[in-house]
Image: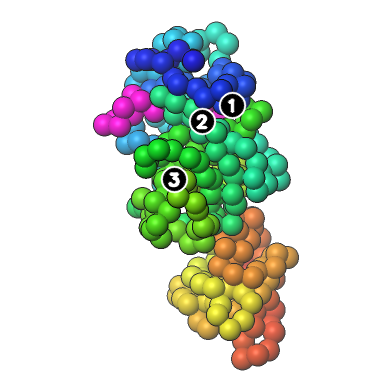
Amino acid sequence: MLAQAGGTQQVAVEAKPAMERARPSIVTFEARGLGQGLAVMIDAKGYFLAHRHGQTGNFAAQTLAGQSFQLKWIAEDEPSQLILLQAAGPLPPGVRPIRVVSPEALTQGKGLIVATAREAFRAEFVSSDRLGILNPSRRLLPLSEVQFQRQKPVNFGGALLLTEAGELAGILHAVLDPRQQQLRGGLLKGVAETAPGLQVGFSIDAAGLEHVIRGLLSPSHEVLRPSIGALCKDAEAENGALVVEVVPGSPAAEAGLRKGDVICELGGYTVHNQIDFARAMLRQPIGKTIDITILRDRVFKVLAIKIGKACD
């Protein structure tokens, strides 16, 4: 068991090695109206990452070894529901940044650890091919799915996802009742079949996590997301992403993209569906002009589109 503010964290046997490795990077804090939350150190300048939990201003934090200090709110990335915090004074001795897992290291069946302020237990990585909308931003984001066995359904939103090596793999946003197609806090597409008793949790995928951390740690503390101003869904008759809306005056409109076009390739990435489109968009540098291959009236065309900045 690991000591922490207000009690003891119940750590399952299989979770102990990962928790010991990650322990110097994890702190607890009082999450407004939700009891204790966890934050994880991501930078040597004293920056921490956490689920937002409605936090603003300064608040008390404590290491898992019981050392107290103050955290202050710096910035929020609304689409991912993640916030950047910073130590308001000197850090306690021994606190250090956590390593963030490489997206390529997360494969189906990989063992993970779900860590809350009260407990830590084993989970299994299922897929990063999920697509969800996390309220209130209504922005489409690639998500990772994990599954874990619990006796009663509990929403572990804000829990840390750790690899068995103690690396940060994500922060849970919500837990899904496997019998529903509704995410607590948003909408979800592509849920895997689950056995009775299993719960399904979701976080932004590892590539998205890296992107959010880079943006929050930038001088502006802003997470910039690329956009062309087109809304897509899975194409039913063709292999690709069907354009259902083009924003007037957007890069897509200026390039000649139309409602009803099917996007097959974007910036060198093959697009089979809506998820591929969202993931390919996230990989595009803002301001760069790329080629986009579309299918229109059974004829393939290539359009040049300049990547813009997403605006909520």
Q: Are marks 3 and 1 in contact (CB under 8 Å)?
A: no
Q: Nearer the viewer, mark 3 or mark 2?
A: 3
Q: Which mark is residue 197?
A: 3
Q: Are marks 2 and 1 in contact (CB under 8 Å)?
A: yes
**How many residues crowd around disc 2 within 10 Å: few (fewer than 14), some, or many (20 or more)?**
many
**What is the distance, in whole Å, between disc 3 and disc 2 at their CAs?**
15 Å
Q: Given this view, does label 3 or label 1 mark the residue nearer the observer?
A: 3
Neighbor class of circle 1 (other Cα within 10 Å; few <14, some 14-19, many 20+) is some
Tag on residue 14?
1
| Residue range (magenta) | 30-44
Front position in the image: 287 or 66 = 66
| Secondary structure category for the residue under label 2 | strand
Residue 121 image label: 2
Inspect the image, locate mark 3, and give the three-letter code of the amino acid beneath it: Gly
Tell me, yes or no, if residue 46 can be seen here.
yes
Side (left or right) of 268 relative to 36: right
Which residue is pictured at 64% across the width and 83% down the height?
295
Amino acid carrying label 1: it is Glu
x and y percentages locating residue 160 in the rendered image: 50, 33
Count numbered badges in the picture: 3
Residue 102 position in % (x across, y down): 68, 40
Quick check: 188 left or right of 20? left
Check disc 3 and report its element: helix, strand or loop: loop
Q: Earlier in the sequence, mark 3 or mark 1?
A: 1
Q: CA distance from mark 3 to mark 1?
A: 19 Å
* Disc 3 + disc 2, Cβ < 8 Å: no
**Which badge, 3 or 2, comes first in the chain's sequence?**
2
SS assignment at label 1? helix
The circle on residue 266 is: none
